[in-house]
Image (spheres, rainbow, N blue to C red):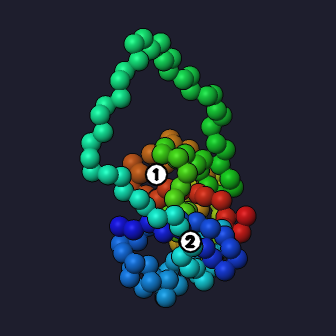
Amino acid sequence: MIHYQLRCQATHEFDGWFQDSAGFEKLAAVGLVECPHCGSTQVSRALMAPAVRKSRRKAAPAPLPEEAPPAAAPAPAPSAPPQPEPGGMSQRVAAGPIPAQLLAMLQRMRAEVEKSCDYVGEGFAEEARKIHNGEAEARGIYGEATEAEAEALAEDGIDIARLPWVPRADG
């Protein structure tokens, strides 16, 4: 794998991982490398600092301090749970920020869902049940559902999918 710092025609910078240099060139040539900020597919590699390897010689271990005071564990900062945007569930990311390429794909997915499906808001579970029972027109829908509503739909054999709902690409 190779890591590149990338830049779009609007000078937004972001990073990406590719199988190799040829892999990046192929994907960029067919427009599959997209700026997560503006969606441009006019992307090129930006200048990067070279990776310099350290000597293979092992250095002598540094001497330990005679008495080191015990370190206190940092207290977790209290935070309010994220609030969902209309049409989405709250967003939780366990390992930090979403990588730029993944964010761009999720933003494209959100745009496609919003373009192709009907937003039914908090009535999602009720509308999904009506569609399943033939009481409403069969169509793609999206909206909000509680954990209990999602579990009840699954128990009743109604297929739903939970999607990570990221901010729109256009801001």
Is 103 placed left or right of 50 in the picture?
right
Q: Is label 1 in a helix, a strand or a loop?
A: helix
Using the image as rendered, state which of residue 133 and residue 158 is in the foreground.
158
Q: Which residue is mark 1?
A: 153
Number of marks in the rendered image: 2
Q: Quadrant of residue 109?
A: bottom right
Which image quarter is the C terminus in?
A: bottom right
Q: Position of residue 3 (x, y in %)?
A: 44, 66
Which image quarter is the N terminus in?
A: bottom left
| Numbered tag placed on residue 24 in the rendering | none
Say what amino acid the circle numbered 2 marks. Answer: Leu
Structural distance between the alpha carbons of marks 1 and 2: 51 Å
> Residue at the location (64% across, 42% down)?
82
Q: Quadrant of residue 151?
A: top left
Asked whether residue 142 appears in the rendered view, the answer is yes
Mark 1 / mark 2, whichever is N-terminal: 2
Looking at the image, do the residues carrying marks 1 and 2 touch, with CB atoms under 8 Å apart? no
Q: Position of residue 130 (x, y in %)?
A: 54, 61
Residue furthest to the bottom: 29
Say what amino acid the circle numbered 1 marks. Answer: Leu
> Residue at the location (46% across, 64% down)?
50
Q: Which residue is mark 2?
A: 47
Packing grade of label 2 (10 A; few <14, some 14-19, many >=20) is few
Q: Is label 2 in a helix, a strand or a loop?
A: loop
Using the image as rendered, state which of residue 143 and residue 106 is in the foreground.
106
- 99 over 10 or under it: above or below: above
Using the image as rendered, state which of residue 125 and residue 102 is in the foreground.
102
- 59 over 4 or under it: above or below: above
> Residue at the location (66% across, 70% down)?
12
Q: Nearer the viewer, mark 1 or mark 2?
A: 2
Q: Position of residue 26 (x, y in %)?
A: 42, 85
